[in-house]
């Protein structure tokens, strides 16, 4: 069933319409709502009729159904703990960035290039990007 044309088409449609809903997107949504109705200034998201923002998620619409994928979904799928930090959080901490590079890449000199990633990370990268 997973190789049927319907499944392939659904996955393609899902990823074509996907967008990342993060703090910036949530703030822009609030600002747009306030521009439409200035009386909402200073109110909470729930009072504006908006959903609460808890974490960064991937959103898409598939067959008129809104689908949301969170970090917890990936953790469950990969059977790992749902904790950790983003690489961007280590912006100024060179030691941690080097440790992450050692973990992800076969050769640190080629960090940033997918072909130098270790096999398990390359597979995950290909799944998420393609």
Image (cartoon, rainbow, N blue to C red):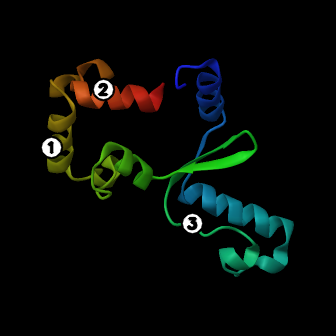
> Seen in the image, is 2 located left or right of residue 100?
right
x and y, in percent, of residue 38 in the image: 83, 74
- Whichever of labels 2 and 3 marks the residue nearer the N terminus, that label is 3
Give the vertical position of 41 relative to 86 (above or below): below
Residue drawn at x 70%, y 66% is: 30
The answer to the question of whether label 2 and label 3 lie on touching residues, with beta carbons closer than 8 A, is: no
Label 1 crowd bin: few (<14), some (14–19), many (20+), radius 10 Å: few
Label 3 crowd bin: few (<14), some (14–19), many (20+), radius 10 Å: some
In which quadrant of the rendered view does residue 99 lie?
A: top left
Q: Secondary structure at mark 3?
A: loop
Q: Disc 2 designates what residue?
A: 122
Q: Disc 1 designates what residue?
A: 99
x and y, in percent, of residue 54 in the image: 51, 66
- Label at residue 53: 3
Give the vertical position of 27 relative to 73 (above or below): below
In 3D space, how far apart are the residues under numbered discs 2 and 1 (Cα atoms)?
A: 17 Å
Near-viewer residue (76 or 86):
76
Give the vertical position of 35 relative to 77 (above or below): below
x and y, in percent, of residue 121 in the image: 27, 31
x and y, in percent, of residue 127 in the image: 42, 29
The answer to the question of whether label 2 and label 1 lie on touching residues, with beta carbons closer than 8 A, is: no
Q: Secondary structure at mark 1?
A: helix
Near-viewer residue (44 or 35):
44
- Whichever of labels 2 and 1 marks the residue nearer the N terminus, that label is 1
Residue drawn at x 70%, y 68% is: 50
In 3D space, how far apart are the residues under numbered discs 2 and 3 (Cα atoms)?
A: 31 Å
Q: Secondary structure at mark 2?
A: helix
Near-viewer residue (116 or 88):
116
> Seen in the image, is 114 located left or right of residue 24?
left
Marks 2, 1: nearer the viewer:
2
> Seen in the image, is 22 located left or right of residue 90?
right
């Amino acid at each position: 069933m997973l190789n049927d044309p319907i499944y392939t088409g659904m996955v393609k449609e899902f990823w074509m319409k996907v967008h990342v809903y993060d703090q910036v997107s949530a703030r822009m949504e609030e600002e747009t709502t306030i521009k439409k109705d200035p009386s909402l200034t200073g109110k909470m998201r729930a009072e504006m009729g908006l959903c609460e923002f808890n974490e960064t998620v991937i959103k898409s619409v598939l067959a008129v159904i809104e689908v949301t994928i969170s970090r917890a979904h990936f953790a469950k799928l990969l059977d790992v703990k749902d904790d950790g930090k983003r690489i961007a959080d280590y912006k100024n901490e060179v030691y941690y960035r080097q440790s992450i590079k050692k973990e992800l890449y076969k050769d640190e000199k080629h960090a940033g290039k997918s072909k130098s990633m270790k096999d398990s990370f390359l597979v995950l990268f290909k799944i998420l990007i393609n």
